[in-house]
Image (spheres, helix red, strand yellow):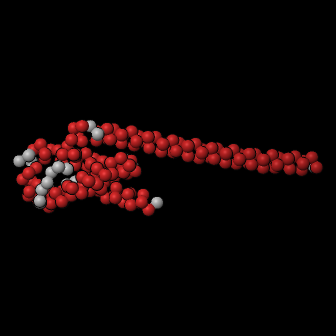
Amino acid sequence: MVDLAMLQIVRDVVAIFGVIAGFTYYALTVRNANKTRELSLKSQEQALETRQAQMFFQIFDKFHEPEFFDKFTQIFTWKWTDYDDFIAKYGWKTNPEAWYSEGSVAAFFEGIGLLVHLKLLDITLVHGLMFRHIKMFWEKMRPISLEMRKRLRIPHIDQWVEYLYAELMKHDKEMLTT
């Protein structure tokens, strides 16, 4: 009987160690899977940051092409008193080349604004290399864009330029306070 009792104890101890070994194996497997997932997420984040930087520098290259920069700088030589004066001097009927230049620059900044809004482009990149240009452009063209929205009854004209400007100003303020 002692042998049978001893066998039962040994059997119970072996079963307990089996459960402990199984639980330990499971815990180690889960821990390893979590570490692998964390590394994968970090790798994905790094890949996303790299893609954002690549995309931004493709955009930045376009920004510095002579044709674009000529259009951008030309706008800052323009002078007008109000919306009607602007249209008379630079509108699609009287000066299609100027109209196209302004529209081209606005569309470029619209695209960047939408990419920032969709979180496909980090505002820090845009702020670091294009802040003053976007700020100057929107501050010069804001009265025209806002009046155009009213007169044409198209409330979304230059909305992403305006959004981008607002985000850049917030980011700039944050940078100054940190």
Residue 159 visible in the displayed image: no
Name the one closer to the observer, 172 or 37.
172
The image quadrant that residue 74 belongs to is top left
Q: Residue furthest front?
A: 77
The image quadrant that residue 172 belongs to is bottom left
At x 42%, y 60%, the residue is: 176
Q: Where is residue 76 in the image (x, y as percent from the top left)?
A: 20, 50
Name the one closer to the observer, 74 or 30.
74
Q: Which residue lies furthest to the right in this view?
A: 2
Looking at the image, residue 55 sits to the left or right of residue 157; the answer is right
State whether residue 76 is above or below residue 176. Answer: above
Q: Where is residue 93 in the image (x, y as percent from the top left)?
A: 5, 47
State whether residue 30 is above or below residue 152. Answer: above
At x 26%, y 37%, the residue is: 65
Q: Position of residue 71 (x, y in %)?
A: 20, 43
At x 28%, y 51%, the residue is: 134
Residue 100 visible in the displayed image: yes
At x 46%, y 60%, the residue is: 178
